[in-house]
Image (cartoon, rainbow, N blue to C red):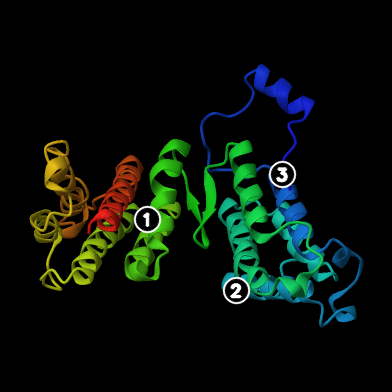
Amino acid sequence: MKIYELFSKRQKKLRGEVPDVYQYKTIPPELRVQVIHIWFDIWGEETLNASYDDNPHCNAYRIYNSIHHVLCREYGCFTLGPENNLVERVTNFLLKIEDTEKVIDVVELSFQYIDQVVRDKPYLFSPMHISPDEAIDELNDRFREHGVGYQYESGQIIKVDSQFIHSEAVKPALIMLSNPMYKNANEEFLSAHKHYRERNYKDCVDDCLKAFESCMKIICKKRRWKYGEKDGSQRLIKNVFDHGLIPPLMQSHFSGLRSTLESGVPTVRNNWTAHGQGPEEISVPEYIAAYILHLTASNILLLAKADEEMK
């Protein structure tokens, strides 16, 4: 659905009241309500006016029932609220819960149903006012509008630090990795994003390296370049350069590329996470994890694009 540039929004922009830095601690109540509006556009608002017992075969109710069941099971509770209406139970939970991570749980889970179930069988939810793609686009636009640093990409909510880096590196890398050929690298890169969102920064860096190495192994296997399954990043980097993944005429232009790749993801990962913590616990700072996450996206995108162009 089109997002309207209302007078009040324009005035806020003129007064400099629009957030220009992302925050992650709170999900504004207006954003939560807008998420529910998106739900209603997908599977109908009329579900608010009846109980689940009245509509046991209603496909929208099945979605709400699934969301409710999954959350209750994972949170170790029997119900999300006292309401008799199942839809109100889920929507009120989203509106009232103070734990930001649980708010993201509800949003992510609901949009996974939109992205997969509704997309796969749209005729079960007819008439829809918007498509799954439009629903996801609006969600991401609403996140940006409220200065909340999350986006729904490739089936999960990921944390965004810079919209420019996200749009120019992370999102294209995720699109590239959605190719079934890159299945393992995709799973590892998404796992890195999940760890980053959950502030498990050591695990984030570790999975970044796995995704980076997997990407190179996949390219080597595709092109039948000999490599060892246990080869680390240094050998794999040398392998793809030796086979001319970067065209010879361009290697002078990328004179610093090898050092960037070799001293970027692998070295930071080795120094911070790979060799045991010793007597003192090692804490990877968030800014290091964010840098490695973005560097990994750029490296993966570069390698995959180079592979696409290579004859």
Residue 6 percent location from the top left of the image: 77, 30
Calculate the distance from the C-alpha at mark 2 to the C-alpha at mark 3. Answer: 25 Å
CA neighbours of label 1 inside 10 A, class few (<14), some (14 to 19), many (20+): some
Residue 101 percent location from the top left of the image: 56, 55
Q: As shown in the figure, which amino acid type bears the numbered disc 1?
A: Asn
Query: Is 178 on the left-hand or right-hand side of 211?
Result: right
Q: Which mark is residue 200?
A: 1
Q: Nearer the viewer, residue 297 or 179?
A: 179
Q: Quadrant of residue 51?
A: bottom right
Residue placed furthest toward the top = 15
Query: Is 53 on the left-hand or right-hand side of 122?
Result: right
Q: As shown in the figure, which amino acid type bears the numbered disc 2?
A: Gly
Query: Is 130 on the left-hand or right-hand side of 143?
Result: right
Instruction: Find disc 2 in the rendering and name its residue.
Output: 76
Is residue 178 visible in this depiction of the protein?
A: yes
Q: What residue lies at 9% left-to-right and 56% top-to-bottom?
A: 238
Q: Nearer the viewer, residue 280 or 119?
A: 119
Q: What residue lies at 58% left-to-right and 55% top-to-bottom?
A: 104
Is residue 193 visible in this depiction of the protein?
A: no
Q: Compare marks 2 and 3 and give the one earlier in the sequence.
A: 3
Calculate the distance from the C-alpha at mark 2 to the C-alpha at mark 1. Answer: 23 Å
Q: Compare marks 2 and 1 and give the one earlier in the sequence.
A: 2
Instruction: Find disc 3 in the rendering and name its residue.
Output: 29
Compared to 247, does 217 lie above or below? Answer: below
CA neighbours of label 2 inside 10 A, class few (<14), some (14 to 19), many (20+): few
Calculate the distance from the C-alpha at mark 3 to the C-alpha at mark 1. Answer: 27 Å
Contact between labelled residues 3 and 2, with CB atoms less than 8 Å apart? no
Q: Compare marks 3 and 1 and give the one earlier in the sequence.
A: 3
Q: Secondary structure at mark 3?
A: helix
